[in-house]
């Protein structure tokens, strides 16, 4: 079994150990007006790391985001030819960071919402081998640009994610997070809308250790591009939670749904039996039809749950294979670099 914790690569004198490289990634879309503010606050030195590098993923911007990044001294700039969505940009950043040899990856936003001075707080639980994924928890109630409705929805959404993921994350939609190398290798985002909820649920149900730490925030520089309307945000977030839960807990999900519908069918059937025994059965044939439909649907959902569970087992095997392939590629790359050094 592969250990899910970060394995430090370098030993300091006296037995203390340090992780070698931190990569700070920022997914961007038309952020030329705010990116320089966020970059000016990023650190070049973080305790526990020998080097800190910056990575920008330009998700098909139509402005000068990439140029602003290069002029600000960003180490790595990756561009999507077209806009593929925040989740895809996030995953591109993870894959690129792994190829760059990152031991820990910090993800933040280009609008300078999160205080970069709290990056050491995010990375500390990973350095201490206490967590694989660390979420920065914003002061929701004290954030002035959050409306009353948005605050309550943030709380409700975080509660739903905690229930679905079996974690204790206080601010699930927060994009300010630190990810260990091993966790980054295990995460796979399916949706295109956002990565925040999906990665927490996936990590929690995959046995990764998820922690959260309180962080500071800055005033809002621009309106959120994800929350275009409260209704749209709720629908998309709820869809993400349901989809990920069905992916990782299909049998339980379908059994619950089938069980509820089966109970409705059973109640309808008992209602007909009651009236039938009372001599009034002829006027309640609809209850028989409803009971039959509900019981058939319940059986179908149960069968779908069993089939989905088998597919889920296959998916887990494929994820293990993908993880092993990534480890093999990493080992081969390290051996190749070592042979070049010897020459």
Image (cartoon, helix red, strand yellow):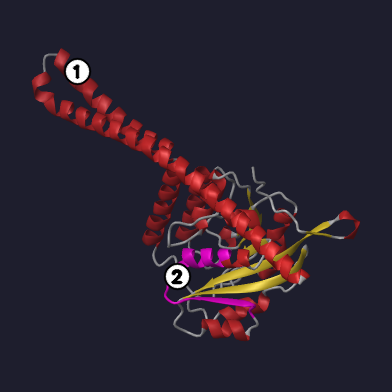
Look at the numbered disc 2 and give the secondary structure of its residue: loop
Task: Examine the structure image and report whether residue 83 is included in the region drawn in magenta.
Answer: yes
Q: Residue 177 appears at what percent x and percent y?
A: 61, 60
**Residue 107 shows in this picture:** no
The tag earlier along the polypeptide, 2 or 1, is 2
For residue 94, side relative to residue 313 (left or right) = right
Identify the residue at image location x=68%, y=72%. Answer: 53
- Tell which of 215 and 249 is nearer to you: 249
Q: Residue 102 appears at what percent x and percent y?
A: 67, 64
Query: Would you name the residue on which mark 1 appears?
Result: 273
Quadrant the C terminus occupies: bottom right
Q: How many marks?
A: 2
Q: In which quarter of the image is residue 85?
A: bottom left
Determine whether label 2 and label 1 are within 8 Å by CB: no
- Give the extent of the magenta segment: 74-95
Identify the residue at image location x=48%, y=47%. Answer: 160
Query: Would you name the residue on which mark 2 appears?
Result: 225
């Amino acid at each position: 079994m592969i250990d899910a914790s970060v394995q430090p690569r370098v030993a300091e004198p006296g037995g203390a150990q340090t992780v070698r490289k931190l990569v700070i990634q920022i997914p961007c879309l038309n952020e030329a007006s705010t990116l320089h503010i966020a970059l000016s606050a990023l650190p070049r030195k973080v305790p526990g790391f020998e080097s800190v590098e910056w990575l920008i993923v330009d998700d098909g911007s139509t402005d000068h985001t990439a140029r602003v990044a290069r002029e600000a001294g960003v180490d790595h700039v990756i561009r999507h030819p077209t806009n593929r969505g925040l989740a895809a940009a996030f995953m591109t950043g993870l894959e690129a960071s792994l190829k760059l040899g990152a031991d820990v990856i910090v993800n933040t936003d280009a609008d300078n919402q999160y205080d970069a001075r709290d990056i050491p707080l995010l990375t500390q639980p990973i350095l201490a081998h206490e967590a694989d994924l660390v979420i920065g928890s914003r002061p929701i109630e004290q954030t002035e640009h959050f409306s009353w409705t948005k605050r309550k929805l943030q709380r409700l959404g975080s509660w739903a994610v905690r229930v679905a993921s079996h974690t204790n994350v206080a601010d699930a939609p927060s994009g300010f997070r630190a990810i260990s190398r091993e966790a980054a290798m295990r995460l796979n985002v399916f949706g295109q809308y956002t990565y925040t909820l999906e990665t927490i649920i996936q990590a929690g149900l995959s046995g990764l250790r998820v922690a959260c730490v309180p962080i500071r925030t800055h005033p809002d520089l621009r309106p959120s591009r994800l929350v275009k309307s409260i209704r749209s945000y709720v629908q998309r977030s709820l869809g993400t939670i349901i989809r990920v839960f069905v992916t990782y807990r299909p049998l339980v999900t379908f059994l619950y749904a089938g069980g509820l519908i089966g109970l409705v069918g059973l109640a309808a059937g008992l209602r007909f039996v009651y009236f039938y025994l009372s001599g009034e059965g002829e006027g309640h044939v609809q209850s028989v039809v409803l009971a039959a439909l509900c019981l058939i649907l319940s059986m179908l959902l149960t069968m779908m749950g069993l089939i989905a569970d088998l597919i889920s087992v296959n998916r887990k095997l494929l994820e293990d294979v993908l993880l092993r392939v990534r480890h093999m590629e990493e080992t081969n790359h390290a051996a190749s670099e070592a042979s070049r050094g010897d020459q």
